[in-house]
Image (cartoon, grey):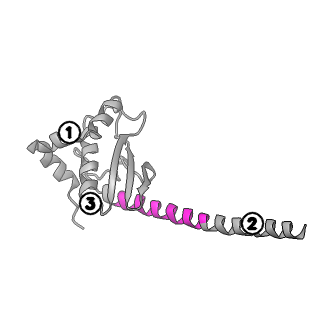
Amino acid sequence: MEIVSGLVSYALAKFLFLSRLSNKEDAGKIKKMEEKVLEVYDIIRTIRDPEKPNSLEELEVVAEECIEVKSLDDDEYLIIIHFKPTVPHCSLATLIGLCLRVKLQRCLPFKHKLEIYISQGSHSTEEDINKQINDKERVAAAMENPNLREIVEQCVIEPDD
């Protein structure tokens, strides 16, 4: 009986030790994802609205809470962004999504995949726009248009401090 009790105690102690290690690893991963969210937000918050002199942060089109980062493997991440146009019929929502994509592709220092969406229920044609801004061919074609490229460049340029 004493041997069984000792084995149970040993097994329980080992389980508790390993679960604490797992919790520390999970806490480390959570902290790392939170840091990545802040890194992404820092990049996109200064993007200028195509029509107004304000940033997307100032207009509350983007917020920290709208960014999700998931680890795909050790050095690659999935970034999911939900943005909210200022009005449900915003004609420039696709352009805003394009600006988000372009700036993140240029500025993120780590390997990533991007998914950019309009927040559910915040735009009258959100499904169509979501398809456009997540379609590589459409994004590439849009950036080949010199007029559109110039507008995107003006929106993503860093403001003078």
Which is closer to the viewer, label 2 or label 1? 2
Q: Residue at x 30, y 34 (%)?
A: 131
Specify the amino acid type for callout 2. Ala
Amino acid under disc 1:
Glu
Q: Is residue 11 left or right of residue 110?
A: right
Residues in magenta, as a range: 22-42
Place of residue 44 in the rendered image (x, y in percent of width and height, measured from the top left): 31, 55
Q: Is residue 73 above or below residue 14?
A: above
What is the spatial separation of the Cα atoms under label 2 and label 1, in whole angstroms? 56 Å
Q: Residue at x 22, y 61 (%)?
A: 158
Residue 161 seen in this snapshot: yes
Q: Residue at x 70, y 68 (%)?
A: 14
User: Which residue is identified by label 1?
Assistant: 137
Q: Gap between marks 1 and 3, in whole Å?
A: 21 Å
- Secondary structure under the numbered disc 1 in the rendered image: helix
| Tally of numbered tags | 3
From the image, which quarter does the N terminus lie in?
A: bottom right
Q: Which residue is mark 2?
A: 11
| Dot 3: element | helix
Is residue 41 shown in magenta?
Answer: yes
Q: Secondary structure at mark 2?
A: helix
